[in-house]
Image (tube, helix red, strand yellow):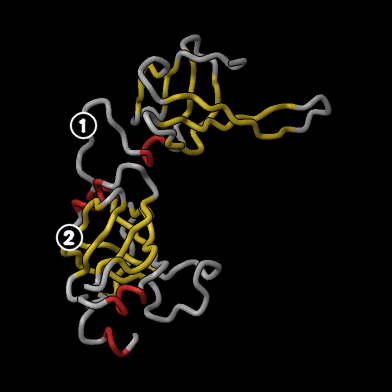
């Protein structure tokens, strides 16, 4: 660990929970009092705000080679996380200077799915939608949710499906379905299915 962090940060060696999900990464220091700026992987970072501690892992080597602050997984207490000027920022317990915050640049953030606050009625976490099968009202399979995309007023389902070529080979295609009530009839998380008012030739 870097010498100037020895007495301030309490990086507790840990293991990831079985239901851990990567929810973001630390972009850089924010201000001069030890705050960090976060890049969340979802447009709804509510889970980051409610968790009292985060599981951290080293940055991807391609993003930040030579990182040696810690190895494996550590757990770090969070004093506060909030939205500020459209960005997510956070303050870790015991970290009060910019140098320490900069040392965490690129670190990956994980949370237990079980620690997420309950979603409101007709609201869903993106992570719960990825992997669900999409069918239309006639029962025709349209593919599987590979990702979601924020487009401002609403999100869009990125639905991946297989296309069979004339020679019999298969390639992957993608459908973009707005995730709004006008097109989405039902979301069945337990049944791993989303029913939509959509046709394959749209």
Extreme residue toward the bottom, this view: 3
Question: For the point 34% across and 55% down, which residue is it?
Answer: 20
> Mark 2: which secondary structure?
strand
| Mark 2 Cα shell of 10 Å, populated few (<14), some (14-19), many (≥20) | some
Vertical relation: 186 (above or below) 92: above
Question: For the point 30% across and 55% down, which residue is it?
Answer: 111
In the rendered image, which residue does mark 1 sit on? 120
| Mark 1 Cα shell of 10 Å, populated few (<14), some (14-19), many (≥20) | few
Extreme residue toward the top, this view: 138
Where residue 42 sits: x, y (%)? 37, 45
What is the C-alpha distance between the residues marked 2 and 1?
23 Å
> Mark 1: which secondary structure?
loop
Give 87 or 186, whichever is nearer the viewer: 87
Indicate left or right for 97 with 180 as reference. Answer: left
In the rendered image, which residue does mark 2 sit on? 80
Quarter location, residue 2: bottom left
């Amino acid at each position: 660990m870097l010498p100037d962090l020895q007495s301030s940060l309490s990086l507790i060696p840990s293991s990831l929970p079985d239901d851990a999900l990567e929810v973001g990464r630390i972009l850089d220091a924010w201000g001069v009092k030890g705050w960090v700026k976060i890049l969340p992987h979802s447009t709804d970072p509510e889970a980051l705000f409610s968790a009292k501690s985060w599981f951290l892992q080293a940055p991807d080597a391609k993003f930040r080679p030579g990182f040696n602050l810690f190895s494996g997984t550590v757990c770090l207490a969070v004093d506060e996380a909030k939205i500020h000027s459209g960005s997510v920022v956070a303050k870790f317990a015991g970290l009060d200077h910019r140098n320490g915050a900069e040392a965490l640049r690129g670190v990956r953030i994980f949370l237990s799915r079980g620690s997420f606050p309950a979603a409101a009625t007709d609201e869903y976490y993106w992570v719960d939608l990825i992997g669900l099968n999409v069918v239309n009202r006639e029962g025709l399979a349209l593919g599987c949710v590979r990702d979601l995309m924020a487009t401002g007023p609403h999100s869009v389902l990125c639905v991946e499906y297989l296309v069979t070529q004339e020679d019999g080979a298969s390639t992957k295609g993608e459908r973009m379905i707005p995730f709004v009530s006008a097109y989405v009839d039902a979301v069945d998380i337990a049944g791993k299915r989303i029913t939509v008012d959509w046709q394959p030739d749209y």
